[in-house]
């Protein structure tokens, strides 16, 4: 990092983290909040439903990948200006996903490549069918994110009432979303 971030920059960086973390649940917001309103109109707007689903899948996976970068140790950060959990003093650094999943997200989502065509893999599906197991990926980055939020709640940087409210609210939201994702995944496995 070229210089240490100021407290104001760290608060703004936390807001970026918060948007990315909540964005990682885009597919499940799509499935539970938006799709039910569109299904009755499927005949007229079916192609828009597919576009929305694909955008939600890509958004979720790009956010998962960004969160994975957030937890890298400084020596492994792709760029010296990346916002990292380490900048806040968080010491549980390291890729929650691991190299194989990071590489796979890069090849299938972040960069246009022939990988999806060569493997005939769907983007998201039941585990074991060649697609991403998004609930498992969300659990990995979600658990590390909860640990980061627990850490933030103990630091002077987030000791004012407004910051404490934001950190606590985000933690509760993540726990609820992770439980919802697992419940939806269980239902999808039962009906597939």
Image (spheres, grey):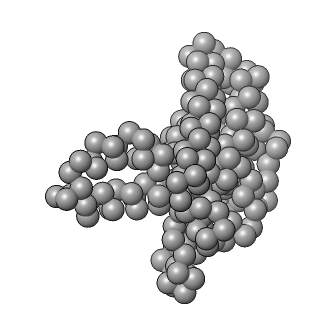
The answer to whether residue 73 is left or right of residue 102 is right
| Residue farthest to the right, as pictured | 91
Looking at the image, which is closer to me, 173 or 187? 187
Q: Is residue 20 visible?
A: no
x, y percentage for residue 73? 78, 53
**Between residues 68 and 178, which one lies in front from this camera angle?**
178
Q: Residue at x 63, y 22 (%)?
A: 168
In which quadrant of the rendered view does residue 11 lie? top right
Residue 96, horizontal then vertical, whole percent: 74, 53
Q: Position of residue 38 (x, y in %)?
A: 27, 48
Q: Residue furthest left?
A: 44
Q: Is residue 146 above or below residue 114?
A: above
Q: Horizontal and vertical percent for residue 30?
A: 40, 47
Q: Residue at point 42% right, 47% down?
A: 31
Q: Residue at x 65, y 54 (%)?
A: 137
In the displayed orientation, state which residue is furthest to the top.
161
Q: Give 68 or 73, whichever is nearer the viewer.
A: 68
At a point 34% along the width and 56% down the height, the residue shown is 52
Number of numbered discs overlaid on the protein picture:
0
Q: Residue furthest front?
A: 191
Report whether residue 58 is seen.
yes
Q: Relative to residue 67, is residue 52 drawn left or right? A: left
Above or below residue 99? Residue 71 is above
Left or right of 151? Residue 26 is: left
């Amino acid at each position: 990092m070229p210089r240490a971030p100021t407290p104001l920059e760290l608060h703004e960086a936390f807001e970026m983290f918060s948007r990315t973390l909540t964005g990682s649940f885009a597919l499940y917001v799509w499935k539970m909040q938006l799709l039910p309103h569109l299904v009755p109109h499927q005949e007229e707007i079916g192609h828009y439903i597919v576009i929305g689903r694909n955008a939600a899948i890509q958004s979720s996976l790009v956010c998962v990948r960004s969160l994975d970068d957030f937890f890298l140790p400084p020596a492994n950060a792709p760029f010296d200006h990346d916002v990292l959990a380490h900048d806040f003093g968080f010491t549980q650094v390291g890729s929650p996903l691991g190299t194989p999943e990071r590489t796979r997200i890069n090849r299938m989502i972040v960069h246009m490549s022939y990988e999806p065509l060569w493997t005939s893999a769907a983007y998201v599906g039941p585990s074991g069918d060649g697609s991403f197991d998004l609930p498992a990926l969300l659990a990995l980055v979600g658990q590390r994110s909860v640990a980061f939020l627990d850490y933030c709640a103990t630091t002077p940087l987030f000791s004012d009432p407004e910051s404490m409210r934001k950190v606590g609210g985000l933690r509760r939201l993540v726990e609820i979303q992770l439980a919802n994702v697992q419940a939806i995944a269980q239902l999808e496995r039962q009906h597939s």
